[in-house]
Image (cartoon, helix red, strand yellow):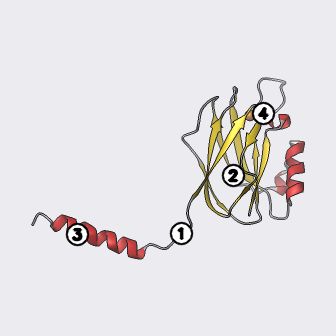
Amino acid sequence: MPFAPRAGLAAVALTLTGAARPSPALRHVTIEAHDYSYVVPATAPAGPTVFHFVNRGHVLHEVQLFRFNTNVDDSTARAYLASGNVPDSVADMSGGVLIAAPGQTTREALYAELRAGEHYALMCQFRDGAGKPQHAMLGMVALVTVR
Ligand SMILES: [Cu+2]
């Protein structure tokens, strides 16, 4: 019965396929860090999304990814980011961080279930030394609006 194992595996695979529910396609977004800005799409479609991070600059960078509260509109969110001060009261406490050395792409990534109307903030609070400004204050902030 040399084919018995294969037939058994096929039956299992069919059972799993039949039980699977359709799910929206996973999207991938790459966040590029430069000295001192991000290159990232200004908008992203709703749905399950993985954010990847690559550092094309010459110093260490991070990306803090967090979500503004839904009552914060696009221009207000940008104003908070430009000020370098985002109060806890205007953003969700959840989020994630990726850190990449110069020239490196992280092997890690951040997964988010994006919903229409949300605004995701990107921010780097690293400094190039004591007394130096946060990279956010040099322009290293960005906003991704979910459509
Ligand atoms: Cu930085």
Disc 2 packing (10 Å; few <14; some 14–19; many ≥20): some
Q: Reading the chain from its start, which is encountered first: label 1 or label 4?
A: 1
Q: Is residue 61 left or right of residue 19?
A: right
Asked whether mark 4 lies closer than 8 Å to ligand 1, one says: yes
Q: CA distance from mark 3 to mark 1?
A: 27 Å
* Residue at x 84%, y 34% (from the top left corner): 138
Task: Using a 10 Å C-alpha cutoff, classify the residue at mark 4 as few (fewer than 14 neighbours), some (14 to 19) or many (20 or more).
Answer: some
Q: In the picture, residue 119 is in which quadrant?
A: bottom right
Within 10 Å of disc 3 (Cα), the crowding (few <14, some 14-19, many 20+) is few
Q: Which amino acid type is marked by label 3?
A: Gly
Real-space Cα separation, disc 4 to disc 2, in angstroms: 21 Å
The quarter of the image holding the N terminus is bottom left
Residue type at numbered disc 2: Gly
Which of the two discs, 2 and 3, labels the residue nearer the N terminus?
Answer: 3
**Element carrying mark 2:** loop
Quadrant (top left, top right, bottom left, bottom right) of the C terminus? bottom right
- Give the residue pinned by disc 4: 36
| Residue hosting label 1 | 23
Q: Residue furthest bottom?
A: 18
Q: Secondary structure at mark 3?
A: helix
Q: Earlier in the sequence, mark 2 or mark 1?
A: 1
How far apart are labels 1 and 4 at the CA level?
37 Å
Tags 4 and 3 touching, CB below 8 Å: no
Let me know if residue 124 appears in the view.
no
- Residue at x-position 86% and y-position 42%: 84
Residue marked by disc 3: 8
